[in-house]
Structures are given as C-alpha cells and as structure tokens.
C-alpha cells in the first residue's frame, strides 16, 4: 500500500474534483464517502484542495439539479477546501495526454498543489495519469485512510 502523504508527519493532501464536491453537498446521507472526505478536511485531519474550475462546475451542476444544496455547498467550500487558481496553458502543456482534455487542468492543479491523491468518480478521465498522483474514487480513498489509521496503533 502506498503511504498516504509525501512526508511522514504532514497531512494527507488530497485534490477534490467537482463531482466529489457535488456529491458531498447533495448527499442525503451525512456519511457518504464524499461527505466524509470533506468532514476529515473540516476537522483538519487531511488537507483538501480543489480548483476554481471544480468549484464553478460543481456549483453550476448543483444549481441545475439540486439548487436547495447550494447553501451547504457554499458552507463546505468556505470551511473544508483550499481553492487554487487555474493552471495556465503553459503550465498544462507538458502534461498533455495524461487526462481528458477538459480535465487536464484539474490534474495539473492537483500536481501543482503537490497532492498525492486526486479523488473523483471519473477515473477514466485521468488515464494514463501522472506517476506522482494516485487517482481514486471517494470510497477507495476512505478505505486507504482507514487502513492507514489501523496501522497507527
């Protein structure tokens, strides 16, 4: 199993894609994997990072599909994630081909933020990916965190 952070004592840095932000805000259950990841960040157990693009995309989709969740979303953004600016075209160019065109800026933002993990429901958008970042679904990330905690006895 890969370690959860680059340096032993540092918090896990995880990049949160728009679909996970959406699910965390719109989830009818308080303990969905997406909600748990955001809660872990709010409790400062992990460091959750996202991009301006991901925030806009999640907000736009919530407005269309679940507008009543927008206040929860705004609260989550303010309390649980650090929002990074969009990478420039020059920053993205060296990574061309490592993600779908529309998601390349997400991958580059995650790499630029030195995240070890990119959490998304759209794994296929990030193939072949980059060797310095692991792309996984929210439930798989929660399982990794649980495994890591189990070894800290």
Image (cartoon, grey):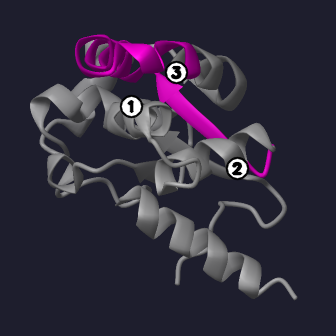
Residue at (68% x, 78% y) in the render: 148
Quadrant in which the C terminus appears = bottom right
Vertical position of residue 97 compared to residue 86: above or below: below
Question: Gap between marks 1 and 2, in whole Å?
Answer: 16 Å
Of the numbered discs 1 and 2, the one sitting upstream in the chain is 1
- Main SS type for the magenta part? helix
Report if residue 24 lies within the magenta region: no
Q: Secondary structure at mark 1?
A: helix
Q: Which residue is mark 1?
A: 22
Q: In the rendered image, which residue does mark 3 sit on?
A: 73
Q: Which residue is mark 2?
A: 40
Distance of label 1 from label 3 (alpha carbons):
8 Å
- Tell me the element at label 2: helix
Please determine whether, in this image, residue 130 is positioned above or below residue 15: below
Alpha carbon separation for disc pair 3 and 2: 16 Å
Describe residue 44's horizontal placement relative to residue 99 as left or right: right
């Amino acid at each position: 199993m890969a370690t959860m952070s680059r340096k032993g004592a540092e918090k896990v840095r995880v990049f949160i894609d728009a679909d996970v932000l959406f699910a965390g805000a719109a989830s009818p259950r308080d303990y969905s994997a997406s909600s748990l990841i955001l809660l872990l960040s709010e409790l400062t157990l992990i460091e959750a990072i996202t991009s301006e693009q991901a925030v806009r995309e999640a907000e736009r989709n919530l407005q269309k599909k679940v507008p009543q969740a927008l206040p929860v979303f705004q609260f989550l953004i303010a309390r649980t994630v650090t929002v990074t600016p969009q990478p420039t075209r020059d920053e993205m160019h060296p990574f061309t081909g490592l993600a779908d065109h529309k998601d390349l800026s997400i991958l580059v933002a995650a790499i630029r933020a030195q995240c070890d993990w990119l959490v998304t429901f759209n794994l296929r958008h990030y193939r072949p990916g980059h060797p310095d970042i692991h792309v996984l679904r929210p439930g798989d990330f929660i399982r990794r965190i649980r495994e890591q905690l189990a070894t800290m006895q």
